């Protein structure tokens, strides 16, 4: 029987259908009709052995041809950074030397009659020459991506309206637009430093919205009002992370050969334990970008963001903490309360409602309500444990103390706690990883 374990795609040799890449469920399907950002749709892939060719967007046609007509399989095709260049290289090499000098040979039906046995050839990065080629193509692609990203940063011709309101962004302000959508509309596609081809990314998202499609669940609705209510009520103000169509817009996807961004992030750091060099003097932490409570200003250090809020807006969080003797979790609730009130265009000091965020900020400054807080019972509520914005770095910098945990425990006595259901604990121990953890602990 023909073994398919040596490459990731599933292939049917005898049948007409050849699935050369993993399938996706409908909600995760790639839009194969969309032109590639890195290759024109008219670019051709050439056969390694004959004159056959196919457009890049129809690569499965040529891969099927290689399999059926020439009995050759290319391993991990989807991880090759520049497939046309890769194919041209190996076409030239196969003209110089026989395929058996490069490819592993897999014999089908090895235990059957000789006349029913066939040889198939696997071209993959186990071969050092193939590995070097893939690394060079990956490095070239990464350089192109970083160059493109720098061009976007330097481009002063950016002009775009927010997808959710009428606010306009012009000049070199695409990062301001992304921050605006995250702050004002709770919609984030990631850090600006990780985005490339930003205009095309936003065009893709705008096209989906124009076609009344939810950006997260990707269902289509009858009108804009229904779509808006759906995304708001279901908290679908984010993109579908399982949609591979978006991968090309994130720089992290181009960083390492043969790995997707999920694999890069999930690598086990324990592999680094063998390094006995404990000198961390040259280690630099990735800067945490915290956003001001009142405007779009961001700072890479907490001292800078606190100084900005104090000098630009007259808000002194440290002073409030000291005067009100706020514990850590009370500070968390206060920050979340203020963010939510401003997001709702409401003055947190006097609770007056305004038509826009700009109006409420002007009111706060004019009426000197910056340091005016309502009674503690208004904001010291359990609902403000939950962040108003995802990844709010300001919450990670609040001052803590040794007795906060004890204080918070006594303060939360009035909050009801729902007991766990332990009715099926015995079955859980036998069928889950808990059983293994208990065994490890006992040994």
Image (tube, rainbow, N blue to C red):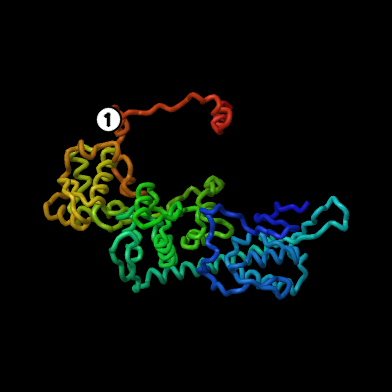
In front here: 183 or 97? 183
Residue 238: horizontal and vertical position, in percent? 40, 53
Quarter the C terminus occupies: top right
The quarter of the displayed image where residue 307 is located: bottom left
Q: Can residue 195 be seen in this view?
A: no
Q: In this view, which residue lies farthest toward the left?
A: 367
Q: Is residue 131 above or below residue 418?
A: below
In this picture, residue 251 sits left or right of residue 114: left
Residue 8: horizontal and vertical position, in percent? 65, 54
Q: In this view, does 270 lie above or below 136?
A: above
Residue 112: horizontal and vertical position, in percent? 86, 51
In this picture, residue 105 sits left or right of residue 438: right
In front here: 132 or 170? 170
In this picture, residue 219 sits left or right of residue 174: right
In front here: 260 or 399? 260
The quarter of the displayed image where residue 92 is located: bottom right
In this picture, residue 344 sits left or right of residue 57: left
Q: Image point 59% across, 58% down: which residue?
A: 258
Q: Is residue 365 above or below residue 132?
A: above
Residue on which disc 1 sits:
411
Residue 171: horizontal and vertical position, in percent? 31, 71
- Tell me the SS state at disc 1: helix
């Amino acid at each position: 029987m023909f073994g398919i374990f040596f490459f990731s795609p599933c292939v049917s040799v005898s049948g007409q259908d050849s699935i050369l890449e993993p399938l996706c469920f409908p909600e995760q399907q790639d839009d194969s009709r969309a032109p590639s950002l890195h290759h024109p749709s008219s670019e051709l892939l050439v056969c390694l052995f004959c004159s056959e060719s196919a457009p890049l967007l129809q690569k499965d046609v040529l891969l099927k041809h290689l399999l059926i007509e020439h009995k050759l399989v290319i391993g991990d095709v989807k991880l090759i950074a520049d497939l046309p260049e890769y194919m041209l290289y190996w076409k030239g090499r196969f003209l110089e030397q026989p395929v058996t000098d490069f490819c592993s040979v897999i014999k089908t039906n090895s235990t059957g009659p000789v006349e029913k046995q066939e040889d198939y050839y696997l071209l993959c990065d186990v071969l050092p020459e193939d590995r070097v080629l893939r690394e060079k193509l990956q490095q070239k692609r990464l350089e192109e991506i970083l160059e493109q990203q720098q061009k976007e940063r330097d481009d002063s011709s950016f002009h775009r309206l927010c997808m959710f309101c009428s606010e306009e962004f012009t000049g070199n302000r695409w990062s301001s637009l992304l921050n605006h959508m995250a702050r004002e509309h709770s919609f984030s596609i990631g850090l600006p430093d990780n985005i490339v081809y930003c205009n095309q990314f936003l065009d893709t998202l705008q096209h989906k919205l124009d076609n009344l499609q939810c950006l997260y669940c990707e269902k289509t609705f009858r009108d804009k009002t229904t779509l808006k209510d759906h995304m708001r009520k279901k908290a679908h103000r984010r993109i579908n992370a399982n949609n591979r169509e978006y991968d090309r817009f994130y720089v992290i996807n181009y960083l390492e050969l043969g790995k997707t961004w999920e694999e890069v992030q999930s690598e086990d750091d324990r592999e680094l334990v063998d390094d006995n060099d404990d000198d961390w003097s040259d280690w630099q932490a990735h800067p945490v970008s915290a956003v001001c409570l009142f405007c779009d200003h961001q700072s890479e250090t907490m001292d800078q963001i606190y100084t900005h809020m104090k000098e630009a807006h007259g808000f002194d969080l440290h002073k409030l903490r000291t005067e009100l003797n706020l514990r850590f979790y009370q500070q968390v609730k206060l920050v979340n309360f203020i963010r939510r009130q401003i997001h709702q265009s409401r003055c947190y000091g006097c609770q007056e409602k305004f038509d826009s965020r700009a109006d409420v900020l002007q009111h706060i400054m004019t009426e000197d309500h910056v340091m005016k807080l309502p009674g503690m019972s208004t904001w010291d509520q359990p609902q403000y444990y939950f962040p108003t914005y995802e990844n709010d770095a300001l919450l990670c910098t609040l001052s803590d103390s040794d007795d906060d945990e004890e204080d918070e425990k006594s303060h939360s006595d009035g909050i009801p706690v729902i007991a766990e259901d332990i009715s099926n604990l015995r079955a859980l121990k036998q069928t889950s990883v808990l059983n293994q953890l208990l065994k490890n602990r006992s040994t």
